[in-house]
Image (cartoon, grey):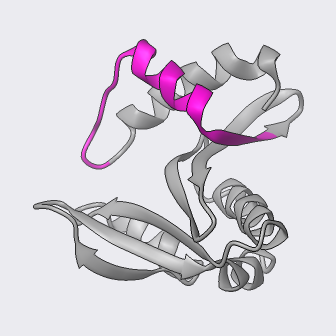
Amino acid sequence: MKKEDFDTVKVLFEEGLGKQNPRASMPYSRISEILKTTTTFICVKDNNIIGLVSFTASKKRIDLEFIYAVKSRQGVGKALMLKVAKYAIKHNIALIRSSVSIIDEDASAFYKSLGFSKGKKMDWFLYAISAPARTVVSRSSIC
């Protein structure tokens, strides 16, 4: 993400929170903090940002913070996850991890299509999910 994309990405981040299941919200200051402390990749089409993914990386794994595509079922999410997985492989990181709401069937299906599997329940509505980076690459490149 370029510096000049920051404000647009911040607006899309907020928009994406409102489309989650269950709906979520967050003050702009917190969104700014997340974007400043994570790596964020964007997807651009016709000079418009149509998706984003933010994550943190350690030596062992990537933790997804947020992923959002303006229009679903267009391959944007898979393209973004492919970027993350390639980043992981380039940096010798084997695992990608995230969380998903137990009621968000669309998110669960998306992650499952990329090779993620559910781990332990994190709290009353979130499951930890993870996938090997190489599995995500092989599944993402199909789209």
Number of numbered callouts drawn: 0
Q: Residue furthest left?
A: 124
Q: Residue furthest right?
A: 46
Q: Is 44 in front, or is 98? A: 98
Measuring from the top left, give residue 46's x and y in whole percent.
89, 32
Query: In this picture, is 62 found above or below 119?
Result: above
Measuring from the top left, give residue 133's x and y in whole percent.
67, 77
Q: Residue at x 57, y 33 (%)?
A: 37
Measuring from the top left, give residue 137's x and y in whole percent.
75, 78
For residue 50, what is the image quadrant?
Answer: top right
Query: In this picture, is 112 found above or below 79?
Result: below
The quadrant in which the N terminus is found is: top right
Measuring from the top left, give residue 102's x and y in whole percent.
23, 66
Q: Residue furthest front?
A: 59
Q: Residue at x 49, y 68 (%)?
A: 97
Q: Is 2 in front, or is 17? A: 2
For residue 39, what is the image quadrant?
Answer: top right
Q: Is residue 121 left or right of 85 when viewed as pictured?
A: left
Question: Is residue 26 inside the magenta stretch?
Answer: yes
The quadrant in which the C terminus is found is: bottom right
Q: Is residue 121 left or right of 2 when viewed as pictured?
A: left
Q: Is 43 in front, or is 64? A: 64
Q: Which residues are magenta?
A: 21-43
Q: Residue at x 51, y 58 (%)?
A: 63
Q: Residue at x 84, y 68 (%)?
A: 90
Q: Is 70 in front, or is 6? A: 6
Question: Is residue 37 inside the magenta stretch?
Answer: yes
